[in-house]
Amino acid sequence: MIKKKIVVIQGGTSREREISLKTAKFCIKAIKKIGYKAVKFDPKFLSIFDIKKINPDIIFNALHGRDGEDGNIQSYFEYLRIPYTHSGVLSSTIAMNKHFSKQLFRNSNLKTPNYFYIDEKNYLNFDFSKEVKKNKIKFPVVIKPNKEGSSIGVKICKNIKTLKKEFNNLKNSYESIIVERFIPGQEIQVAVLGGKAIGAIELRPKRKFYDYDAKYKKSSRTEHIMPANIPYKKYKEVLKISERAYKILGCKGVVRCDFRFYKGIFFILELNTQPGMTDLSLVPEIAKYVKIPFIKLVKWIINDASINR
């Protein structure tokens, strides 16, 4: 019997390279346990077109961040005509662009924090006070890159002075930036598989918020409450909102939706089309709680790619 050959795209050149390698490590281990052949492929060192020489049955996309989850690498997969995991070109592009996704969420009546968008064309002499007032945003606010993952570059600002300072720190590295109202309350994240929300987990970070260190460093380990400690009706509600967000963005495979729950309202912050698959990642933890072990989850992701492409 010929083993199914899975090329695992890992590493890359984004700021999330380290996390991508960790995701790939755990997924490769699972792929081998399933009985498939796993072939590592790092686009940092190889041309993406070299994948064709390997002749894989499926590409398992374990990249995170720019080029991995923003529609770029997906466009190459489409060109090569090789089935691949996770969402397609358009969904990945929209989800990675917080401004685009927020507009779609708003148009579909999903609550998202009030915000404004800054393009590099407007970086010079941008009037922060005017935009804060115009968009009815009260301090504290969150400033972050418009197209970035893993909470990289995210800062909480208590006043205009701090906001301008953090903007100056970001503007040389990013072509667009988002400033949004900071929503207090509970941090809730939902895993969605194939359009079906399977569970919601609550996060209680030791740090100010669920930043990069809280996500990936065991020393900054966040308390995970599964299922999320919210009323049953609200739990069902956030699952339904996540399924709507998945459909609105036209996603495929597995995604994670991030929320803040405040005064009985769910505010969707973003949707991640390439959620982490490490030992500290949330989607595998949620899946495990609903009796989907990691190996079964990885197999589902692979089978989903072969069905939907």
Image: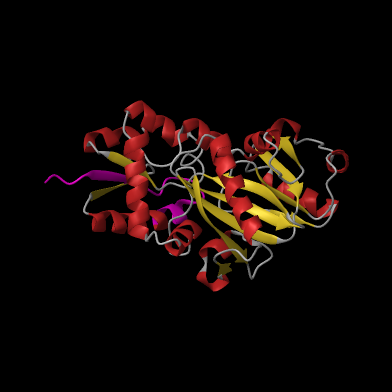
Residue at the extreme top: 79
Q: 249 or 211, which lies in front?
A: 249
Q: 237 or 131, which lies in front?
A: 237
Q: Quadrant of residue 210?
A: bottom right
**Is 12 colored magenta in this rendering?**
yes
Q: Residue 303: percent from the left, percent from the top?
A: 32, 43
Answer with left or right where residue 271 lies relative to residue 234: left
Q: Residue at x 57, y 68 (%)?
A: 225
Q: Residue 85: percent from the left, percent from the top?
A: 38, 41
Is residue 152 at least partly visible in the picture? no
Q: Residue 298: percent from the left, percent from the top?
A: 35, 52
Report the colour scheme. Answer: secondary structure
Q: Which residues are magenta?
A: 1-21
Is residue 197 at least partly visible in the picture? yes
Q: Quadrant of the C terminus?
A: top left
Q: Residue at x 64, y 71 (%)?
A: 206
In this rendering, the answer to whether 242 lies above or below 79 is below
Q: Quadrant of residue 60?
A: top left
Q: Residue 211: percent from the left, percent from the top?
A: 61, 59
**Is 8 colored magenta in this rendering?**
yes
Q: 119 or 151, which lies in front?
A: 151
